[in-house]
Image: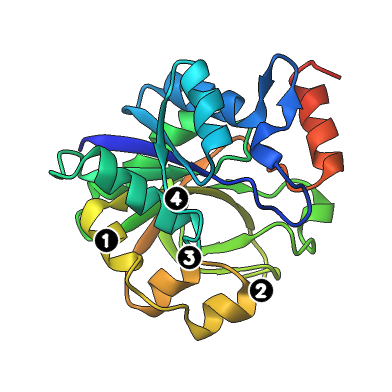
Amino acid sequence: MSALIVIPARLAATRLPNKPLAMIGDAPMIVHVWRRAVKAGAGPVIVACGDKEIAEVITAAGGTAILTDPALPSGSDRVHAAAETYDPAGKFDVVVNVQGDLPTLEPDLVAASVTPLANPAIDIATVVARITLQEELNDPAVVKAALSLEPGAKIGPALYFSRNLIPSGPGDHYHHIGIYAFRRAALRRFVTLKPTVLEVRERLEQLRAIENGMRMAAALVDTIPLGVDTPSDLERARRLLGFA
């Protein structure tokens, strides 16, 4: 499989305006994410930019920036638009969506996200990690995956996602990490689908795929990157990266 890595980014954000350009040490956050995605070595990396200011900092850092329509409704739409612009002939049969607010991303997670697609029945792959912190279990900001994972297995079907604790009963619970590897045809189909009942209710875009019969699977990984959504998250990212 040949993969194209796309990082969607735009300046509009409710809780942390201009988030991609927030400085973390020597560079804006989006540049840190781009650098880590490049280190993964999983394929070429482009940034789908909803604003020219983001494109400018990525270009200055030596990266490839694709401007997308700022009116696009979601990161997935932005990823699709950038992929079609960069690769209109469809040379890359997998497109990996790496969220632009993961400055502590371990590069290995990008490559791990593609591994479930070795099963030809899977349309979309992602990554999860076991929840080890008690406070995460009931934190609605931590998305949980109902993962059918056999003992000792590292990949399993992802059957549902929720902000609540799922499934019930004894056993591990899984923290969903916002990296998605789409088969090219699956991404093209996904962006044509309308928002669905459970997607709107849970505020989780990936449920649109499940509600429309698309099959998802997840790879189990060992680390959870910090997602930056608030000023306090940004300060924590600076500390974790040694820029406090």
Identify which residue, 138 or 244, lies in the foreground: 244
The tag on residue 233 is: none
In primary-sequence order, the first of circles 1 and 2 is 2
Circle 4: element type: strand
Residue at x 50%, y 64% (from the top left corner)? 73
Given this view, does label 3 or label 1 mark the residue nearer the observer? 1
The tag on residue 168 is: 2
Give amino acid for label 2.
Ser
Residue hosting label 1:
188
Badge 4 crowding class, 10 Å Cα cut-off, few under 14, some 14 to 19, many 20 or more, is many
Report the residue that reaches farthest toward the bottom.
Answer: 197
Q: Are marks 3 and 4 in contact (CB under 8 Å)?
A: yes
Circle 3: element type: helix
Q: Are marks 1 and 2 in contact (CB under 8 Å)?
A: no
Circle 2: element type: loop
Residue hosting label 3:
206
Badge 1 crowding class, 10 Å Cα cut-off, few under 14, some 14 to 19, many 20 or more, is some
- Rounded to the nearest angstrom, the CA distance separating label 4 from label 2 is 22 Å
Q: Are marks 4 and 2 in contact (CB under 8 Å)?
A: no
> Residue 12 appears at what percent x and percent y?
66, 52
The tag on residue 126 is: 4
In primary-sequence order, the first of circles 4 and 2 is 4
Badge 3 crowding class, 10 Å Cα cut-off, few under 14, some 14 to 19, many 20 or more, is some
- Rounded to the nearest angstrom, the CA distance separating label 3 from label 1 is 14 Å
For this view, does 231 lie left or right of residue 92?
A: right
- Rounded to the nearest angstrom, the CA distance separating label 1 from label 4 is 17 Å
Give amino acid for label 3.
Gln
In primary-sequence order, the first of circles 3 and 1 is 1
> Residue 213 appears at what percent x and percent y?
32, 76
Give the answer, above or below, for where 118 lies relative to 185.
above
Circle 1: element type: helix
Given this view, does label 1 or label 2 mark the residue nearer the observer? 1
